[in-house]
Amino acid sequence: MASIQRLLIANRGEIAVRIAKTAKRLGIETVGIYAENDINALHTKIVDIALHLPGDAIQNTYLNGEKIIEEAIRTKSDAIHPGYGFLAENAGFAEAVQEAGLIWIGPTPEQIRNLGDKIIAKQTAVDAGVQTTQSHEVHPDENIPSIAMPVIVKAAAGGGGRGMRIIEKKNDLKQAIKDASREALSSFDDGRVFLEPFFKKGRHVEVQIFGDAFGNVIHLGERECSIQRRNQKIIEETPSPGISQETREQICQSAVSLGKHVQYLNAGTVEFLISENNDVIFLEVNTRIQVEHPITEAVTGLDLVELQILIAEGNPLPVTQQDIEFTGHAIEVRVVAENPSTNWLPSTGIINAFKVDEQIRVDTGIQAGSTITPDYDSLVAKIISHKSTRQEAIRNLEGALKRT
């Protein structure tokens, strides 16, 4: 069983700050990395050691896996936590971390590779007995299979809505496949796309799972993620207010079944679509910690980053499914640096003041004086409200936002 004494956080912003706080509480030293335009970022002040990665392009800094591993070894770090985004779902990076003799805080490289491929993940769900829809891998220069409209075109290696198209008319499908494939190739270096039925009034509900090296897999409840803009989540809550207890039990059990089928390790999120007729349809697996994990922490009382670290050290899960108690209702809103008057384009510049109600949880990577650049995601903070009921949580959140 390994013991992590020093942890390199291969990320930036609010998730780097979030990971560092738990590591410090556990007595683990932290190493942070930063690009030149992040020299005064909050995460560089939270960590014990802050390392500058030279270079102007993101490929030379936060996406430079070789350099990050080199710095982890040089600083005598025991482990690397990738957070979310950047290299978090890069199976090659996870393999390289392990080959360097470091602890990878996340699922196995094989799980990242297979479950990150939406086509393989769908087949894995079928093999695990989890309900999903039929999908068809398609190629720009080949004939289109017979399929009922409307459909959604998705990138096999995609995320964040890139490479995604909703098509109502079959005449538009050929061009949509070409466009989606081109975008997927540009975004993920993988142009494979597939088709599946599109449900106009579906709900996006996901289940948080954890697995350890001893074959234990548990769920920590579901999160409602249907409020989105441009295929990006902006408000999440738990429990989902739009599903029945029967559906809740079905998706949570389905998520655990899938996790056990692949002997899932560490944190993961199994995503489902709930149709207008309450059909449960598996969508995909995110093999990492999620942006919206704080609401799960709020209702369970568990620190999900701590669980990740304990499992990576080789410990069994410290809780069983029967130990999990869900208390109250939690809602998270994402605060983004976007300008509504310019159709929500990213907004850049120096933050002159940033003050949030102290009675509510705030996860952020900024402070007064921080600079928002155009180089990264527009997320700057998350505000999390947790109360006994949904109505109380909404009221509490509304008050906090007014005072922010």
Image (cartoon, rainbow, N blue to C red):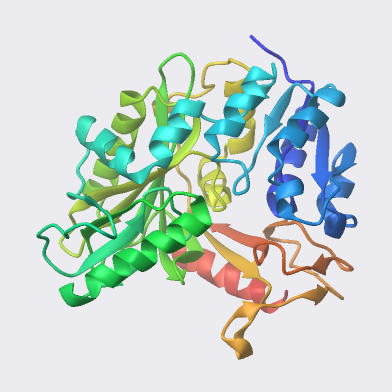
User: Is 252 or 127 nearer to us in this picture?
Assistant: 127
**Residue at the bottom extreme?**
341
Q: State which quadrant residue 102 falls in.
A: top right
Residue 259 on image: x %, y %: 36, 30
**Residue at the top extreme?**
1
Residue 353 on image: x %, y %: 85, 74
Residue at image position (60%, 22%) is: 312
In the rendered view, would you say 344 is above or below 301? below
Residue 301 on image: x %, y %: 57, 40
How many numbered tags mark residues here?
A: 0
Q: From this viewpoint, is residue 163 visible?
A: no
Residue 286 on image: x %, y %: 45, 43
Residue at image position (66%, 21%) is: 103
Say left or right for 304 vs 43: left
Say left or right for 252 vs 19: left
In the rendered view, would you say 73 is above or below 91? above
User: Is 187 or 40 nearer to us in this picture?
Assistant: 187
User: Is 112 or 307 nearer to us in this picture?
Assistant: 112
Q: State which quadrant residue 385 falls in.
A: bottom right
